[in-house]
């Protein structure tokens, strides 16, 4: 029997296969084409857009006195790639509920009472708030008595001092008396000299105020891993011990607390992530972008007023955790009279003096050159990011209004 269809069927099969292959290659072609277009769109459109965003943020930053970060506006402050993740977004939302505190809430010095047993008794409260470091700009802060820096504590050499600290922070904390020779139980180091002060509880520190000089107090964290982070949140303030016998003659004095901040978009303080999620999660040292004098950036820093002929003692206190600040005064040389609170036997004549983290430096300026003079950090990026102020003689204004 002849099977004529058999011979005809084979070419039909081949034809079908060819057709299928043709369709497949067309399918591959279109897939390839679509992917290519997507790829090109990504590179030509999306990436430059990202770049423009970053460049735009940078321009805003330079326009705003070189400062990044803007709590009130919530603009792109300092994104660090995509670190501004969902977790941080929830932080931003909850920040708006915190009290907003600014210079009008700031006490220069902490008042005290004299207790029945002869102590100068001070009360410090550690709490969480938003700190206005420039007009309309705030950062998430932890501080003492609702202000940045904490109020200056001032006592006389040898005074019996009692500081009652109430912890209203969301985390445990301690207070360390930097440069004061306190008994070891009063040193304020969690796990070494005391148990950390839990939220909602109080702790009483007692010591004799020695030695005299410019010193400070600051959190030492709830443990060793959170000391830097709690400092970066703002938990510090000056502690001045006036000597029994004053060796320096001056007409006015100013205490300038130098600090640094890593402010992310929406006023988020990068230190909070380290505290909440562990110090090892991100870079060990924050990328500080805002540098304050007494909690404010230039031109919102308070100026140092002086009259011709007056001597001015300026106490620098670097409460920051990483940056050093070569502080430079225009138009004057000055005498470095004390370092770390100790008088120098031979005061050094200078115009720039570096204050390292944890150091204090006292300088004496003789007001013999009237004018409005810049006093600023000569790590000039720090100056541009806030660390400037003016030594301003009575009757001398800057040629242009600063703000
Ligand atoms: Cu500096």
Image: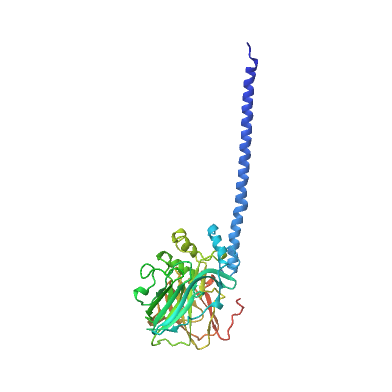
Location of residue 67 by image quarter: bottom right
Rendered view: 304 above or below 259: below
Taking the image as shown, residue 95 lies to the left or right of residue 160, namely right
**Residue at the image position 63 percent from the left and 12 percent from the top:** 2
Q: Position of residue 192 (x, y in %)?
A: 36, 68
Q: Quadrant of the C terminus?
A: bottom right
Observer-nearest of 225 and 300: 225
Taking the image as shown, residue 333 lies to the left or right of residue 15, namely left
Q: Quadrant of the N terminus?
A: top right
Observer-nearest of 106 and 68: 106
Location of residue 371 by image quarter: bottom right
Observer-nearest of 272 and 30: 272
* Residue furthest bottom as drawn: 309
Q: Is residue 81 visible?
A: no
Q: Is residue 280 visible?
A: yes
**Residue at the image position 64 percent from the left and 29 percent from the top:** 19
Q: Position of residue 386 (x, y in %)?
A: 53, 72
Q: Position of residue 337 (x, y in %)?
A: 41, 82
Rendered view: 268 above or below 112: above
Q: Position of residue 253 (x, y in %)?
A: 48, 84
**Residue at the image position 62 percent from the left and 38 percent from the top:** 29
Observer-nearest of 326 and 35: 35
């Amino acid at each position: 029997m002849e099977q004529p269809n058999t011979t005809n069927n084979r070419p039909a099969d081949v034809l079908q296969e060819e057709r299928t292959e043709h369709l497949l290659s067309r399918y591959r072609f279109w897939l390839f084409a679509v992917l290519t277009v997507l790829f090109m769109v990504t590179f030509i459109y999306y990436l430059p857009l990202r770049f423009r965003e970053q460049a735009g943020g940078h321009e805003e930053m330079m326009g705003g006195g070189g400062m990044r970060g803007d709590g009130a506006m919530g603009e792109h402050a300092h994104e660090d790639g995509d670190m501004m993740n969902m977790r941080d977004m929830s932080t931003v939302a909850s920040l708006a509920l915190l009290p907003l505190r600014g210079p009008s809430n700031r006490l220069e010095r902490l008042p005290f009472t004299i207790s029945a047993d002869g102590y100068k008794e001070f009360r410090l409260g550690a709490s969480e708030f938003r700190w206005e470091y420039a007009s309309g700009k705030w950062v998430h802060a932890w501080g003492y008595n609702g202000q940045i820096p904490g109020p200056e504590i001032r006592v006389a050499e040898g005074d019996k001092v009692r500081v009652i600290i109430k912890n209203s922070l969301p985390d445990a904390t301690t207070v360390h008396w930097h440069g004061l020779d306190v008994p070891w139980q009063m040193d304020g180091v969690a796990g070494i000299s005391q148990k950390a002060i839990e939220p909602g509880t109080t702790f009483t520190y007692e010591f004799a105020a020695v030695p005299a000089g410019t010193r400070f107090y600051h959190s030492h964290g709830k443990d060793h891993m959170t000391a830097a982070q709690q400092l970066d949140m703002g938990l510090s303030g000056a502690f001045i011990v006036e000597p029994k016998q004053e060796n320096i003659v001056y007409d006015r004095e100013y205490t300038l607390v130098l600090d640094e901040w890593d402010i992310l978009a929406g006023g988020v303080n990068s230190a909070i992530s380290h505290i909440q999620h562990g110090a090892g999660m991100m870079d060990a040292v924050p990328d500080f972008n805002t540098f304050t004098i007494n909690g404010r950036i230039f031109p919102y820093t308070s100026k140092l007023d002086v009259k011709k002929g007056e001597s001015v003692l300026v106490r620098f206190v670097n409460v920051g955790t990483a940056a050093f600040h070569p502080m430079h005064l225009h138009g004057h040389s000055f005498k470095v009279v004390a370092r770390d609170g100790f008088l120098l036997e031979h005061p050094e004549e200078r115009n720039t003096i570096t204050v390292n983290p944890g150091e204090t430096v006292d300088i004496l300026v003789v007001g013999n050159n009237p004018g409005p003079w810049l006093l600023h950090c000569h790590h000039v990026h720090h100056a541009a990011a806030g660390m400037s102020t003016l030594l301003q003689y009575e009757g001398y204004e800057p040629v242009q209004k600063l703000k």
